[in-house]
Amino acid sequence: MPRLGTGDVESLRAHSVPIPSNIDPCASSDWFKSAHAKSRPTSKDLSHHFSIESRSLVGSAIKAFANQHKTSKIIALGEGRPVPEYYPWEHLSFRGISSSLNNIEAGSKDEGALQSVAKQGDSYNISSALNYGHAVGSSYLVRFLTEHVEMVHDPPYADWKVCLSCGSTSALELALRIFCNRGDTVLTEQYTYSTAIEAATLVGLRVQGVSMDPEGLRPDCLDEILRTWDPSRGPKPRLLYSIPTGQNPTGTTQSAGRRQAIYQLAEEHDLIIVEDDPYYYLQLGPYLDRPSTRDNTEELKLDETFINPSQVPSYLSIDRSGRVVRLDSTSKILAPGLRTGWVTASSAIIEKFVCYNDVCVGGVNGPSQLMLWTLLDRSWGHSGFLTWLENLSKDYCSRRNIILQACDRYFPKDICHWTPPEFGMFLWINLDLAKHPVHRSATSLGGDHSQQAEIEERIQSNALKNGVKVAKGSLFSADRRYDGKLQFRITYAAASKGDLDEGVRGLSNAIRKEFSLSPI
Amino acid sequence: MPRLGTGDVESLRAHSVPIPSNIDPCASSDWFKSAHAKSRPTSKDLSHHFSIESRSLVGSAIKAFANQHKTSKIIALGEGRPVPEYYPWEHLSFRGISSSLNNIEAGSKDEGALQSVAKQGDSYNISSALNYGHAVGSSYLVRFLTEHVEMVHDPPYADWKVCLSCGSTSALELALRIFCNRGDTVLTEQYTYSTAIEAATLVGLRVQGVSMDPEGLRPDCLDEILRTWDPSRGPKPRLLYSIPTGQNPTGTTQSAGRRQAIYQLAEEHDLIIVEDDPYYYLQLGPYLDRPSTRDNTEELKLDETFINPSQVPSYLSIDRSGRVVRLDSTSKILAPGLRTGWVTASSAIIEKFVCYNDVCVGGVNGPSQLMLWTLLDRSWGHSGFLTWLENLSKDYCSRRNIILQACDRYFPKDICHWTPPEFGMFLWINLDLAKHPVHRSATSLGGDHSQQAEIEERIQSNALKNGVKVAKGSLFSADRRYDGKLQFRITYAAASKGDLDEGVRGLSNAIRKEFSLSPI
C-alpha cells in the first residue's frame, strides 16, 4: 500500500475512530493511523533503557480515574474541576494569515478567515480547552499530528505514537530524565544547543561531544568512543542527542548516508537517539554561487521534499527498532510563544512522556492548542500547512542568500571560513587563529585558552559596539571548554532582511580590528 | 505606612519602573513594590537548603545573553528567534465576562468588553507574547501579580519576588527538585493532594504524613516527628508541603493560631514551607445549621477578608525569614487549561524557579499570559479581580450549602461524619468501620487492610452504578496504605448545582447498601 498523501486524509478520517462531539477524549495515535501504518512489525522492547527515576513511574492515579467513564452521564463529585461556567471567557477569536503567500515578509499578507471558538460547541471549544486537559494533548491535535507524522515520516514500525510537548526544550529535559541516571554520559555533536548542555548538566549528566565535519556528526568518531569506552569513566553512553538538520549552531545537515551509518551504530551499540529536529522544515536548497543574477528561490520544489523526504530522511523514518525519540517544535515554523511541540516514539516511550506531563507540567495549555487547531486543522488543513512551510522555506532561503552574499562581500577570506547551510537558520563562522597577530608573534596561543577566550569576547563586544549581536562559539561547546578554535554563530532569522547586510559588516569589522586589518 | 489597597495602585504605578512601550523587558518584582514593602528587613540566607541538583544551576547562558541590550537598536544575528512577521496570527480577541455578577451560574452573565490584541502595539501584544518569553513571565503580569501579592499578603520581609509558573503542579515539582535530594523525606498532611505524592515519589523522595484534626495539620505531631527523628531513616526532613486552606482532600482550614504554631516550628527546626494555596480565594464562611431558611450568602463581606486576611493569614504573610514558598494557581479561580500560576518567595529561591523554567519548560506560554493580562489588568483591574473572587466565593458557598443539606438529608448519621468546609471545594466523609456488618461479626477487620480496600472499592463502584463518581480516601493517604479508616472525598465544584443533591443520594445509597441499610 502506498504511503499517505494529503489527499488521503479525508478518507482516512472517515475510517478512523470518530472524536465524540460533546467531549475531548483521551486519544491515542492508534485511532488515527492508516491500515498501512498499523500493518508494520512492532518495535523492540527497549525498556532496559529507562532510568531509575522513570522506571517506576506510572502516572497520576487521579487523572487516570478522571479519564474513565467519560461518555455516559455521571454526576461528578470525584474531581476538583471547576465547571466551565466559572471560566471568565465566553468567546475567543483568532485571525490567522493565509498559507498561500509568495513572500511572507513583503507585507502583502493575505488575512485568513476569522476563526471563532465558542464556549460550548460540537467540537474542540473553550469549555474543553480551558478545563484540565489530557497530558497527551487534545484529541483534535493528536489526530492532526498523527496524520502529519505518517505523511511525512511514515515510521517503519507499527506501535509509534505522538504526544504533545510543552516545546522541545521541555521534551528534551523529560527525555534525559526518562533515560538517564545521574553520572551517565550523553553523546552530542561537538557543538550543540547550549540549553541542551545546561539541561544535561542540571540532570547530573556528563556531556561528551562527537567530532563533526561538514556533514555533521562523524560516525567513525561515534564508533570509536563507544568501542573504546573506559568503564572507569562511568556507564557506557546509551543516549545520543543529535540535531541532524540545519544543526544548531553549525548549520550542518547530515546526508542520507550519514544518517544510515549513525543509525546502524545505534543498533550495534544499543543507543537511544533523541532526534531534535526543529529546523527540518526550513529547507533552503543548495546555495548557488551567484544567486543575485536570478530568482534563486524558484529552484525549490518543496512539496515532494516534504512528503517524500528521501534526500534527508528523518531518523524516525528509518527507525526499524523504535529507538528514536523525535522532537518536533512549533517554535521555528509557527511561533515560539506557544510553548508547544510534539514527540514521536514507540508507545512504551510515549507513555513515559505522558506520565511525566501528568505529574509535572500537566500537559500543554489550552489556548495554544486552540490556536493550533483552528489554524492547522480548521483553516489550513494538511496541504495548507505544507504550503505554509514551503513559503516559509522560500523566505528563509532568500534571507540565507542575503547573508551569504554579505559574508562574501565583507569577511576577510583568508581568516573566515563557512559552509553555506541548506537547512535551518544558522551560519557558523570559523576564524583562523593562526592569522591572529598574537599568534604570529608567539607560539603559545594554541594552548593558551584564556587568551582565546579574551579574543572571542573582544570580537563579540566590538561587534556589539558596531551595533550587531552575535553568539560566541564557545557557548555551544559540548564539553564547555576552549578547544583551539575561534567560532561565531550568526543567524538570518531574527533581524529584518534589510539589516542583514549591515549586521555582517559590523561583525566583519570587529574581526578585522582584532586581526589588525582595516575596516570595510 | 499603611499597606497597599486597590485604590493605591494607580499612584504606585506612577512611581514604579515604567514598562518600555516597544518591548517586554525581563522584569523584577522590585520594580513594582511600594516603598513600604521595600523598607522591610531582608530574608535570612537559607541557601543550605538547595539540593545537589539545583545548587549549581545558574540558568541559561544564551537566554541571559538574549536579555541583554534590549533597549537600543541592535541587529540581532545572535539569537535564533523568528521575526514576528513569520507568526501566522495577525489578531486575537477575547470576550471575558464582567466581574460584577450576582450569580455566575444563573445564566445572567454580563458580557465584558471585547479585548483585542494587535500584532504590534504600544504594550503587551502578539509579537511579544508569541516570541520566546521571559521565564519569570511577562513584565505586565509580573507587575499585576506583584501588586496583588503586596495587597493581599504584604510579606514581612523586603526581598520577596513573584514569578509565573506553569501551574502549581509544575511549581511543586520544581520546588521538590530545588530543595530535595533522592532519599530525603518530605512532610505533608496525613492526607494530601495525590499528584503531590506522585511527584515526590518520582523525584525519589519518601513522604511522611503528619496527623490532622479538624483544624488541619497538628503542630504537636509535627514537632514530635522532628524532635525524635531517627537518622537511620535518612536526613531529617527539611521541607513541609502543606495545603493550609480548604485542604485537598479533607477540606480543613488551619486557624491563625495553628499557622503561627506551625511557622514557629519551621523556624525552630529550619523547615522550608511549601504553601500550596489554590483554594485560598474560595472563602465560603461558616455553615449555619439551617441555611435554607434565608439567603446565607449574604453573610459574606469578603472585600475585607481578601485585603486584610487576619482570620486566616497566609504563611507568606507571617514569614519573617523567607522560608515560605507560596504557590498560587489560576486553575480554581479562572481556568485550569491556562496552565498558569505564580510563585512568591525570597529572591534567592525565585531565582532557582526562573532558572528551571529557562532550562526546562521555557516559561509560561504567551496566549495564556495574553488572556490573563487582557482580563485582569486591562479589563477588570485589581478591584474587579477581587469582586470576581467574591462572587465566585458566594457561588461556591451556595454549592457548599446545597451539598451539606443533601448530606444531612441522605447520609446515615451514625455511620457518616463530616466537618463543613469554610474554604475551597472539598468535603471529606468519614465512615465508621465499626458499624460495618463484617466488623460486627468478626473482630479482625481493624487490621485487615485488604478487606478495607475491598469495602472502599465496592462503595465507589456501587456509587458509580448509581451514576455518581466519588474519590476514594486511600488515594490521598500520604504513606499510601490503609490506616484503619474509610473515607471519601466529594466535591461540589464539578457537577451542575442541580445534580449535587442527587449525587449525594447516589453515594449515600452505595454506603447504605454496604452497611446493610435500606436505600433512601
Image (cartoon, coloured by chain):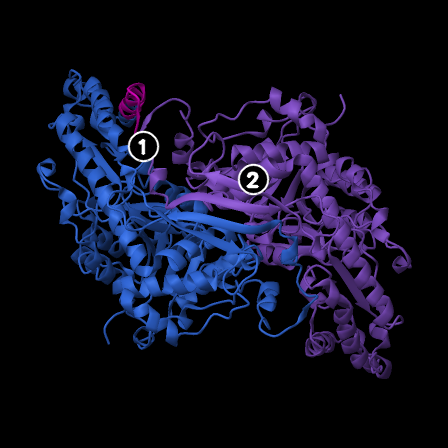
Chain colours: A blue, B purple
Q: Which mark is residue B374?
A: 2
Q: Which mark is residue B78?
A: 1
For badge 1, the amino acid type reads Gly
Q: Where is residue A6 shown, x and y percent of the image?
A: 28, 64
- Is residue B345 in view from this perspective? yes
For the residues marked 2 and 1, what is the alpha-carbon distance in whole angstroms? 32 Å
Label 2 vs 1, first from the N-terminus: 1
Total label count? 2
Q: Which mark is residue B303?
A: none
Taking the magenta stretch, the answer to whether it contains residue A468 is yes
B295 with respect to A2 (left or right): right
Contact, mark 2 vs mark 1 (Cβ under 8 Å) = no
For badge 2, the amino acid type reads Thr
Q: Nearer the viewer, mark 2 or mark 1?
A: 2
Which corner quadrant holds the N terminus of chain A? bottom left
Secondary structure mainly formed by the magenta segment: helix
**Same-chain check, marks 2 and 1:** yes
Determine the image quadrant of residue A159: bottom left
A263 with respect to B85 (left or right): left
Q: Chain of mark 1?
A: B
Q: Nearer the viewer, residue B290 or A516?
A: B290
Q: Nearer the viewer, residue A162 or A128?
A: A128
Q: Nearer the viewer, residue A179 or A101?
A: A101
Magenta region, residue range: A455-471
Q: Where is residue A196 shown, x and y percent of the image?
A: 38, 45
